[in-house]
Image (cartoon, rainbow, N blue to C red):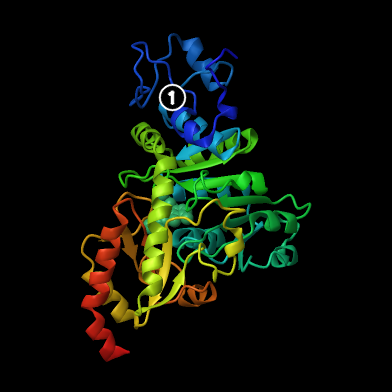
Amino acid sequence: MSEGKQSTEHQQLATQVIHGGKAPQDPEGALVAPLYQTSTFKFSHADQGSARFAGEEPGYIYSRLGNPTITQLETRVAGLEGFPAAAASATGMGAIAATTMALVRSGDHVLVSDAIYGCSFALFSELFERFGIEAEFIDMADPDQITAHLRDNTRFVFIETPANPHLKLLDIAAIKTAMGSSAAKLIVDNTFMTPLLQQPKSLGADIVIHSATKFLNGHGDVVAGIVCGDEETIADIKMTTLKDMGATMSPHDAWLILRGLKTLDVRMQRHCDNAEKVVSFLQQHERVKKIYYPGLANHPKHDLVGSQMQRAGAVIAFELHSDESGARAFLDALDMIALAVSLGDAETLIQHPASMTHSPYTPEARQAAGISDTLLRIAVGLEDANDIIADLKQALDSVASRWRDSA
Ligand code: LCS
């Protein structure tokens, strides 16, 4: 390779977020690859069209089956996660549904962590059941539980770490070891970390999924998903569940995510710095009862920070010395911090999981997963940390009298 032309494999992640992926060639030499905002592609003659459909000639056909802007995003994210291939989808749930549905047949069994995003829980607990697929939810903090529950027909083990909403951590390498020689695939939802803070493939994951809506895009203007894996698995997902169920990404969204990705490294560092400052503030506030944050020494799996995960991330869950109505009054008293679901945006967002992101859980399943009714989740943004803290402080102070009454 000529001097100055380093191959993508050898570039550092902070460079890969900017340069990774096969950029479509622009005849004008534009710095930013053009957006292929097109639904379909012209064939130069009929034989070319049929050869492309038959897979005998490379080339694009129709944007649900592939598009140069989407390909660029897929190759960039696959490279960041250390996989040879990726498939982009319309939403994170589109990626999770297309991936998991491609792996199972009726009569199969799957193992799912008890603590995951609410709609992922709904997919496995309700939709899978309709198709005769048994999803078993277990606490995977003890990897021996996996060995005990694996069956011959278990097709995958699905985990999220850190988990939404209360940052439960799972040891990816220990789970892979516990899976032994099982043919089941280990699927890791890496949304909360991004490949810059956690590399599940190096710890044994077979498939890594993201809600690209979150940190990967980072600007709160897109809903999207992506799944990374080996060539064969990704080709299967693309040619079955993604192509025929149709939750494919729009080229415009792919272009926006490519733009957002360029600042992923600087954004993640700032997100984490801000989160650490917010945690320090919450720790010394008398009205805060409990904080769930992997960076705290009292987190049950704090030792994974610095080994499995590079930093503790930017999502914090906490409980106040109040009942649920006091927690709601606190949310209503916030000013700059947006009362909104989602995470990974420039804006700091806060929400109440039991009635919002995790309302698809049954109350019993929420309790089993350790998600209390008074839990709040804050996704720390990129503002000046002092402004985030000032808003939290004024809201805590403004409802203090109410808590004195209800305490
Ligand atoms: N995986 C995780 C870990 C998530 O947090 C979400 C969405 C998804 C998958 C699904 O991605 P989507 O289809 O929304 O792109 N989490 C949300 C949340 O915590 N608040 O709003 C959505």
Residue at point 46% right, 21% down?
60
Does the beta carbon of the residue at mark 1 sit less than 8 Å from ligand 1?
no
Q: Is residue 357 visible?
A: no
Q: Quadrant holding ligand 1?
A: bottom left
Q: What is the crowding at mark 1: few (fewer than 14 residues within 10 Å), some, or many (at least 20)?
A: many
The residue at 20%/64% (across/down) is 335
Which amino acid type is shown beneath numbered disc 1? Pro
Residue 301 can be seen in this image: yes
Q: Residue pushed farthest top?
A: 45
Which residue occupies the foreground of this view, 132 or 303?
303
Residue 127 in the image: above or below residue 62: below
What is the quadrant of the N terminus in the image? top right
Residue that label 1 marks: 68
Task: Compare residues 297 and 398 and report the one nearer the observer.
Answer: 297
Q: Is residue 336 left or right of residue 214?
A: left
Height in image: 95 above or below 29? below
Q: Nearer the viewer, residue 57 or 393?
A: 393
Q: In this rendering, would 103 be left or right of 209?
A: right
**Picture layout, residue 238 above or below residue 376:** above
Give the farthest residue toward the right. Answer: 181
